[in-house]
Image (cartoon, rainbow, N blue to C red):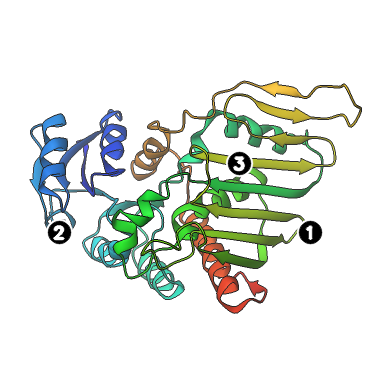
Amino acid sequence: MRKLRTGVIGLGVGARHIACYEAHPDCDVTAICDLDPKKLREVGEQYPGRKMTERANEILTDPAIDVISIASYDDVHFEQICLGIEQGKHLMVEKPVCQSPEHMAEIRKRLAASPGIRFSSNHVLRVSSRFQELRRNIQAGEYGELYYLEGDYQYGRLHKIIDGWRGELDYYSVVQGGAVHMIDLLLWLTGEEPEEVTAFGNRISSRESGFRFDDMVAALIKMSSGAIAKVTANFGCRRPHFHGVEIHGTKKMFVNRPSEAEVFSSVEKGVPPDLMDIPYYDYQKPELIGSFLDWILGRAEPIVTPKDVFQTMATCFAVERAVQTGKPEKIENN
């Protein structure tokens, strides 16, 4: 069997996709694309011998390419996905896969009409060794019945929305670009089904800049089990980038820390928590994209399924509606 031939559009985070594809024994990256000729040249020097282009459509319509990573700016994901599906390409799309419920519905419709196409998104926290162990422990019943969850996307890089491409888009969402990771992680860790959300936002951290959208959003999500999740997208926080996670169960409580996570099982003073020293920051590895390629090759199920992608996006859209209306909003994932 010949190797899968892959193209990568967008060489910011997309440059990491190249390394992940190249780590798979049955895949070759044959083409790369970026709007910035300087970035295209720099990445091309790291990976010589690939076709290089500044035009995404040359990748999307190339009959010699089987698989495409879409890591371009958020506002062009939808049109690139639609063209990729039309051209019969398997697609790995950076979050968010699209910016509106209407676009999500159209993508789902097109995928349903092309069942041979494999589609996923790069929710990388699922391959953190620490979070994988936490999920195994939850599934084994070690935490008892879950009743409260927290997922805080603490970005710590306000300059990227003030000075970078995000602030130049017609619309940029810190929910779709940040909280999406925490929503996906909490749903994957716990197997919970989200039903309803209440949310609020502000732009206090960036109000002296030209950024026009909320830089902070906090949401409360009601799960079908009765559990409650708090999720935030905090782009102006005064700390380095971090994924704050708390899992509260009737038997144990998990608290993520940059070094070692804490696992509490006693309420007695003086009883220290157990420490989980399994690596947390090791999620930039080829495991997730490798599982996507193995899915295409018929060897395994993907770590992130299309259903997972759309459930997370539906939750993000409900959060944004709740911020706009000031009222609880149902999460529509049908």
> In the rendering, at what x and y percent does residue 203 appear?
50, 63
The label nearer to you, 2 versus 1, is: 1
Residue 61 marker: 2
Disc 2 is placed on an element classified as loop
Q: Quadrant of residue 326?
A: bottom right
Amino acid found under the numbered disc labelled 3: Gly
Establish if 67 lies above or below 318. above
> In the rendering, at what x and y percent does residue 17 appear?
30, 39
For label 2, the crowd category at 10 Å Cα-Cα, with few meaning under 14, some 14 to 19 and many 20 or more, is some
Disc 3 is placed on an element classified as strand
Amino acid found under the numbered disc labelled 1: Gly
Rounded to the nearest angstrom, the CA distance separating label 2 from label 1 is 47 Å
Rounded to the nearest angstrom, the CA distance separating label 1 from label 3 is 22 Å
Query: Residue placed at 80% from the left, 35% from the top?
Result: 252
Q: Quadrant of the C terminus?
A: bottom right
Query: Residue placed at 16% from the left, 57% from the top?
Result: 56
Query: Residue placed at 61% from the left, 59% from the top?
Result: 218
Q: Earlier in the sequence, mark 2 or mark 3?
A: 2
The residue wearing badge 3 is: 244
Disc 1 is placed on an element classified as loop
Q: Earlier in the sequence, mark 2 or mark 1?
A: 2
